[in-house]
Amino acid sequence: MGKPNDLVQGTLDLLILKTISLEPMHGWAIAKRIQQVSGEVLQVQQGSLYPALHRLEQQGWIKAKWAESETGRQAKFYTLTAAGRGQLDSETANWNRLSAAIDLVVTEA
Amino acid sequence: MRWLAQLRIRAEMLFRRRTAAARLDDELSFHLERQIAENAAAGMSAEEARYAALRAFGNPALLREEAYATWSWTWLELLLRDVYYGIRTLKRTPGFAAIAILVMALGIGANVALFTIVRGVLLKPLPFADPDRLVRLYEQSSDGNFPFNDNAGGIFAEWKKQSRSFADLALCGYAGYNLSGSGEQLPESVRAATFSWNLLPTLGVQPALGRNFTADDDKQSGNPTVLLSWGLWKRRFGGDPSILNHTILLDAKPHTVVGVMPAWFAYPEAAIQLWTPTYYEKSKSEVEAIDDHAFRVIGRLKPGVTSAQAAAELALITRRIHDQHLDDPFVSIGANIKPLLESLVGDVKTPLYVLLAATGCVLLIACLNVANLLVARAAARRKELGIRMALGGGRMRLMRQHLMESLLLSAAGGALGFLLAYGAIQWVVSMRRDMARVEAIQIDWVVAAFSIALIVLCAAFSGLISSLSARSGQLLSSLQESSRSHSAGQARVRLRAALLALEVGLTVVLLIGAGLLLKSYARLRSNQLGCVTQNVLKMDLQLPQARYKQLPQVVNFFETLLTRVRNLNGVEAAGLVFPMVPGDGYGGDNGFVIQEHPPLPQGTVQYALHRWADPGYFAAIGIPILRGHTFDDNQRPGHATQVVITDAFARRYFPGEDPIGKHLRTEGNRPYEIVGVAGDTRITVGEPFKPMMYFALYAGEDMNGASLVVRSSGDVTLFSMPIQRIVANLDRDLPVSDVLTMDQVIGRNTLDASFDATLLLVFAGLSLVLAAVGLFGVLSYIVAQRTSEIGIRIALGAQREQVLRLMLLDGLRPALIGLALGLAASWATAGMIESMLYGTRPLDPAVFASVAATLLLVAALACAVPAWRASRLDPMQALRTE
């Protein structure tokens, strides 16, 4: 069995940035939201999610804060930083350019 | 502001790593809880929900590792963990760690010390402006014996006038003065140099205070001026700047202090206390003579001119002068050039590089020894490593840990070694004030960088050798092998034996080098000077011309002095000689012709060393008069008619003839009758006897200094103070200098040889000990490895002698191979120290044989203990040890 729901390489960062650009979220919620919004097509594996979150944090695109979650337990909420917002814009533009290009090739050919 | 956020998080990851790890766990368990809750909500049982969540989650440890990997400073954490782990393993075997660190400390310390000296003396550029263009110029004597002779003032003047290759040429001469004391101070005899006024500008140096000599100072009609060294200014004048433009008394003559040189300035050598202008201080005849080689010439090459071109130009000019004065064989025929640095340190180059090579060998031996110890340890930890490998420890990771251990060892050794080197350098600098450029020896950042590089190199070397021996396949199989092994790790034993052979080989090279130098030094010291050296004291006196204007005054002073000294109770004899006692140096020579012989062919030279002595000198220092007699008492000022020649002189110039009654004519063209033939003396220990002629001191024309020689039956140093009191009574402003026994004079002139031999012996001894320890260790290991095998042999009836022989051979094999290697290497390299040897051939069979014997003896002793222990094994015990 192949892995149809594997993410295109390098797009996980974009998805995470986009997802938390609306509101601060913890890891589980981020995974859930991506899954829901994509209509259950994109399944984010924990094995990729947390390293990605930590990497983005180390790079200063996002920052984390511990706060009370909806269940009343302390959880780590991730927020976009100003730099992260810029990064999101440029990655979005990049993605649009790339997907449009792929689209062109796929449909024209 | 992103960098700020990054900085903050980096700081957080650095300082609050533990919290961050706890939080990651928390974050992950929150995720898990939510998943379980969701599964339960979907209708699973509690247990089912939990398992499903865990399955989806994957390996939590791996996930954690992967998240860790994204953090900054992970490399540092791993490094620290390796360091921590390394320290812990080393702590478990403190004996091993201490030995390894000490070995490394000695190796690294010796190298850092030698490197510091070599760098200071040989490698650092001279502290002058654009030093690469500074050269020292030499004259080449017409007989070709002295290609690097000192310069004559007259030749210098022609060079300066005619040559086009130099931005400037300057003249430096030697001088010595009595510096009169003022107030409480005692008079002092100081070493000095004369500089032509343009010498400092040629070097590109300014006085620290005041000014340089002007062209007006630097001529016969000038006023007497002087530049002080920083040290003299501080010591003698309290560092008082108001000394400028004041006068000080040099040889009782007032000289105006025009400047003080910077503290670092030491040209032509560190012992120089003050400088005076050449053309004012030296007589007109001396600076104009074209055959009196009394100066050194320094030049600055013009940009674009090579020193070969400049030498060719000067040689041409010199040749022209030579051809115009064919009647004077002492006019040089050519010229040569050396870089100024080379001219200063050329003599110490070979010995320093030899010592550096020796310390390099010591370090290599130290590394090999530590590598050997590490290999042994790796063998002992074979199982541990095997298990770690089986559990998935990465090869690189294990190798890194291995290297970290050796890095820890060599870093600790290096730190200790650096301290040792610091002490050693202080010692050398204080011991060898006479060494050229000793003032430039300093520990600086280059030395520090060198030490660090050495540490890393040693760590890599010893670590890599031992970790290479831990090949992975071997390691895993070792798990099975060692469950019951009789000859485990054959490859490792072979590696250790190879390391040992190399170590022994290097030791042999060092031992042979040290042996050759020692033998040469012993030859040197047993070399007879030709006079009595026991209980003889010498001291130098210089009567200032300004106060002793008339020769009879000088003679009167000397005669009174000798009478009073000879009257001291216990003094056996006393005499005077100029310029120096035997064994203390060259002292100058003179050309002559023999009146009774046919005239010499044009361009041929006849010369001999010259000395001036009082009639009692020969008896005082124990030089025998072989024929004839010493000077008559009538040899007085204005009546110099007699000369005493030496045996070598008679043999060389009067073969088959009786020299007594013949006459020598020297430059002044006055005839001297040969009245006696004295025994030969050497100018320095180790030099062959050379023809020498003695003139009567009291009849000398401008003789106002001499060395007083005193011989007694007992401890002669007791007379030092009484004699100085006699001098002070005669002239309270006259300093006495260089008070030494003859043994000290010889010691001073053989200091180089004893220094080099001693150091090399220490290094060789050190490596012999290291090699012995290595042999002992390897054989002990082999015995331990083969305990059960030996047990079986003995149980099956092997004789204990057979076991002993077997084990001895096992241990001695690497020693024998190493010995062969070392002898071969020494054979090939001993020639390099030939220039340092006296009376000893580089391939001296006695030295080679005794080194081989010593090494075999030490190796046999090192192997005897483990081999004997093996032969004493109780077979039952041995078989049970498995």
Image: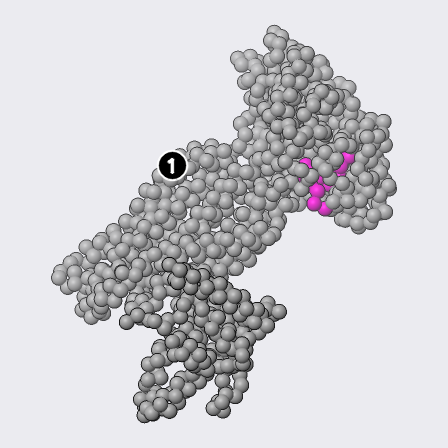
**Please, which chain is the residue tagged with disc 1 on?**
B
Q: Residue at x 48, y 48 (%)?
A: B359
Q: Nearer the viewer, residue B156 or B616?
A: B156
Would you say the magenta stretch is mainly helix, strand or loop?
loop
Q: Where does the magenta region start and end?
A: B263-276
Amino acid carrying label 1: it is Trp
Residue placed farthest to the left in the image?
A: B796
Q: Residue at x 58, y 28 (%)?
A: B681
Image coordinates of residue B298 in percent, x first then y, are: 68, 30
Q: Residue at x 34, y 88 (%)?
A: B49
Examine the structure image and report whether residue B273 is included in the region drawn in magenta. yes
Q: Can the viewer see residue B873 in this picture?
A: no
> Secondary structure beneath disc 1?
helix
Examine the structure image and report whether residue B703 is included in the region drawn in magenta. no
Q: Which residue in the structure is indicated by mark 1? A: B827
Image quadrant occupied by the N terminus of chain B: bottom right
- Asked whether, in this view, residue B788 is left or right of residue B105, the answer is left
Residue placed farthest to the top in the image?
A: B598
- Asked whether, in this view, residue B240 is left or right of residue B515, the answer is right
Q: Using a 10 Å C-alpha cutoff, classify the residue at mark 1 as few (fewer than 14 neighbours), some (14 to 19) or many (20 or more).
A: some
Q: Can the viewer see residue B842 in this picture?
A: yes
